[in-house]
Amino acid sequence: MKIKHVEIIPLVGGTVDGGWPQGHEKKENLHTLLEVHTDEGITGVGSVFTSGALVEGSIGLLWPILRNESALEPERVTEKLRQSSFWQGRGGSVEHTISGLDIALWDIFGKACGQPVSRLLGGNYRDRIKPYGSILFDEPDALRWKLEQVVSTGFKAIKMGWRPFGRQDRKYDELLVKTARETVGPNIELMVDAGGSEQFWPHGLNWARETAKMLANYDITWFEEALPPDDIEGFIELTKQSPVPIATGEVLTRRQSFLPWIERRAVDIIQPDCTKNGGLSESRKIAWCAFDHNVLMVPHGWNTAIGVAADLQLAAAQPVARYVEYLTPCDYIENLTTEPFEIDAEGFLKIPQKPGLGVELDHDKLKRYRVT
């Protein structure tokens, strides 16, 4: 089975604000889908956390290597792309695009074998997992309303991130966390994401350490991106000292970039994003490395239904996995597939068991969001 065509589908009209200072409009293109077509009629879908223009340029670079390659060998093919684009890739948009291709090829492989991707990744350790609803912080009254909405949809865990947390003063940060805990009560897990990958992040180790102490008073499950993403030495010290688990890793690409963070125990929780770090092939290697070093892997997923499906398949195939991220509300998750994801009464998502990623794009729904 050979690769014959890659369709690039930029998504617009339902983009969720990512928390950056300038904000994001719904019409902005931050996510792109890839449909990989084969000579035997099987199509796979991948998701890329990069704009369509950058994906198009990357596909132009990669296509001479990808054309007529096997559609049934995702790990070998995407490693070939990675090695062959070394001087123009090695991260960034090229690696992000390879990620989407990799996810799509695993989808094809699963469909061709009549098996869910999780089984091809090594086997199923679980058939469901807890999603955490991922939202942005807001002013106290608005935050309270957001949290009530998320709880009403069935989530038993919620992560709050970015502005205005860490952007005013310590008292205000504590007010936000106190408001959240009082709103959801003691039985909903809460996570806090400072958003240290924002441009010109002003805080260092002392701020992060003292903030972690405050978060512990409110039973916060983990503290994410407390420092800039290149400050590995700061993270090492913070992880040693923090009373709550420390998490990061969403901006890293390629398995080699994750190794120092895992081997040096810079984090308690590593967060690869398979829509930009190299796909399921790289994420599986990262996850097993983390497992061998007793570091928890929790997929980062601020993306689409295809990204969620890939994360679910990965989580099923890992010996220890507790959560997947679930951006909410998000049209690109809720309104793109033939069957929606459903949270059960205990706050868990069932992991799809159909062949491939286990989800199918609804092309009629997709018309609303694709560039024409």
Image (tube, rainbow, N blue to C red):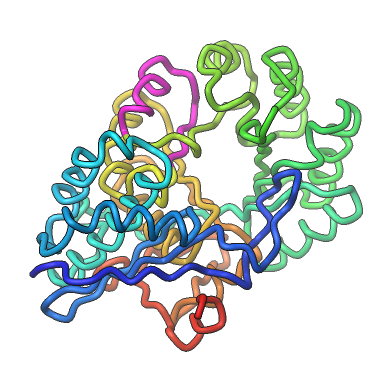
Instruction: Find residue 351 and report its horizontal and vertical position in percent.
Output: 38, 63
Instruction: Find residue 369 and report its horizontal and vertical position in percent.
Output: 55, 76
On screen, residue 33 above or below 273: below
On screen, residue 282 above or below 289: below
Instruction: Find residue 347 and report its horizontal and vertical position in percent.
Output: 57, 60
* Identity of the residue drawn at 72% across and 41% down: 162
Instruction: Work out which quarter of the rendered image holds the N terminus and state it.
Output: bottom left
* Identity of the residue drawn at 48% across and 33% down: 249
Q: How many marks?
A: 0
* Identity of the residue drawn at 56% across and 73% down: 334
Q: Is residue 37 magenta?
A: no
Residue extending furthest toward the bottom = 364
Q: Nearer the viewer, residue 273 or 210?
A: 273
Instruction: Find residue 346 and report its horizontal and vertical position in percent.
Output: 56, 61
The magenta stretch is 255-272
Q: Nearer the viewer, residue 343 or 211?
A: 211
Is residue 251 visible in the rendered image? The answer is yes
* Identity of the residue drawn at 40% across and 62% down: 309
On screen, residue 217 above or below 355: above
Is residue 154 visible in the rendered image? The answer is no
